Image (tube, helix red, strand yellow):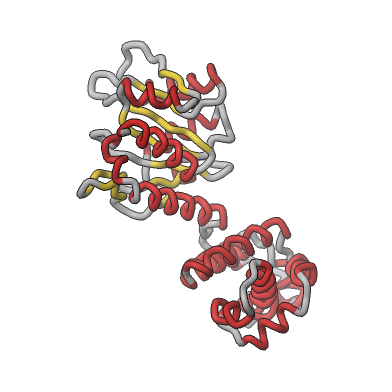
């Protein structure tokens, strides 16, 4: 038996511990604190810190791991481990499973065990969420935390409630877009998400975002909220780039989605698109940006001015 878990224990985990230890030390953290966070002894931390980042990166590169992905993972783990060991484990293990499913470790594994020349077990395994999936979900969770702390935003929650959708960089379908199942509602005078964000959770918002991205690929997030003349007035006073949908008398979801994308095609850079609704369609403001936190910041700026 030649499981790839050996590579995890002997190569991947030690190198990642070394890089994370160096990153935390660079931030001024003591060796004893680093040892506690990484679950190792202080003597082990001292040994890890005796080598530089290049040593560990070369080790990881030698087993087939792209260095740009290593740098991203080190930053994520170094941030997450300060908040929760569970979160750090989650993203570390998600990355490891992604390495396996992409076959990045196969050549190294087979070089150790030539008997595995015909092996493709990892490639047949279920495709796990990538580090990018984890980044998107983290971004959404942070945005929801910001929103929940802003009680004043409830005045801008429409009847159909609020949602925030964020896409992967190369999103192709609704399953590549994360949102909040059940949306975000007003509960005891505060915005409250009905569930934790997940991929494939909002059909309408995902369709809006995907359609806009055919025109402006750098747009990664959209959020809906109430529309009235005061919302528009505030957004304009704040210097935001805004536009209306131009859909005529047609009042259906597809017409709205198409009209939002047409607005981007016509005006280019936009922070908000206003839709005045129609028969069976509530007037709506769509806020766009590069991330969930980006669109929430814009929405909260409007909300603060709206109530004040």
189 relative to 43 in the view: left or right: left
Q: Quadrant of the N terminus?
A: bottom right
- The picture places residue 259, in percent across and down from the top left corner, at 43, 20
Residue occupying the point 46% across, 28% down: 238
Residue occupying the point 20% across, 49% down: 188
21 relative to 296 in the view: left or right: right
Residue nearest the observer in this picture, 197 or 188: 188
Q: Is residue 46 positioned above or below 126 on the image?
A: below
Q: Quadrant of the C terminus?
A: top left
Residue occupying the point 67% across, 77% down: 14
Q: Residue furthest left?
A: 188
- The picture places residue 170, in percent across and down from the top left corner, at 58, 42
Residue occupying the point 62% across, 77% down: 30
Residue nearest the observer in this picture, 216 or 234: 234
Place residue 32 in its image quadrant. Answer: bottom right
- The picture places residue 268, in percent across and down from the top left corner, at 56, 22
- The picture places residue 109, in percent across and down from the top left corner, at 71, 72
Q: Is residue 293 positioned above or below 74 on the image?
A: above
176 relative to 248 in the view: left or right: right
Q: Count all numbered tags in the image, as a single digit.
A: 0
Q: Is residue 248 positioned above or below 297 on the image?
A: above
Q: Residue furthest front?
A: 308
Residue 3 seen: no
Residue 243 seen: yes
């Amino acid at each position: 038996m030649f499981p790839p878990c050996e590579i995890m224990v002997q190569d991947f985990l030690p190198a990642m511990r070394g890089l994370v230890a160096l990153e935390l030390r660079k931030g001024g953290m003591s060796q004893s604190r680093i040892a506690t966070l990484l679950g190792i002894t202080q003597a082990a931390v001292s040994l890890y810190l005796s080598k530089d980042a290049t040593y560990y990166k070369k080790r990881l590169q030698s087993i087939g791991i792209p260095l740009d992905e290593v740098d991203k993972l080190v930053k994520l783990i170094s941030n997450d481990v300060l908040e929760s060991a569970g979160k750090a484990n989650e993203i570390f293990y998600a990355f490891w499973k992604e390495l396996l499913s992409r076959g990045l470790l196969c050549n190294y594994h087979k070089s150790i065990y030539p008997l595995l020349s015909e092996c493709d077990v990892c490639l047949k395994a279920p495709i796990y969420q990538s580090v990018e999936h984890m980044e998107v979900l983290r971004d959404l969770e942070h945005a929801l935390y910001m929103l929940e702390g802003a009680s004043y935003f409830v005045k801008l929650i429409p009847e159909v409630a609020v949602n925030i959708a964020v896409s992967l960089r190369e999103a192709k379908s609704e399953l590549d877009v994360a949102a909040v199942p059940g949306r975000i509602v007003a509960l005891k005078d505060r915005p409250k998400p009905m569930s934790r964000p997940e991929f494939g959770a909002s059909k309408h918002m995902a369709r809006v975002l995907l359609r806009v991205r055919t025109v402006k690929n750098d747009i990664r997030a959209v959020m809906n909220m109430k529309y009235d003349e005061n919302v528009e007035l505030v957004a304009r006073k704040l210097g935001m780039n805004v536009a209306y949908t131009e859909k005529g008398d047609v009042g259906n979801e597809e017409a709205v989605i198409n009209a939002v994308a047409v607005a981007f095609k016509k005006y280019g850079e936009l922070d908000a698109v206003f839709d005045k609704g129609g028969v069976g369609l509530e007037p709506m403001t769509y806020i766009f940006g590069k991330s969930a936190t980006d669109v929430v910041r814009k929405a909260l700026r409007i909300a603060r001015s709206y109530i004040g």
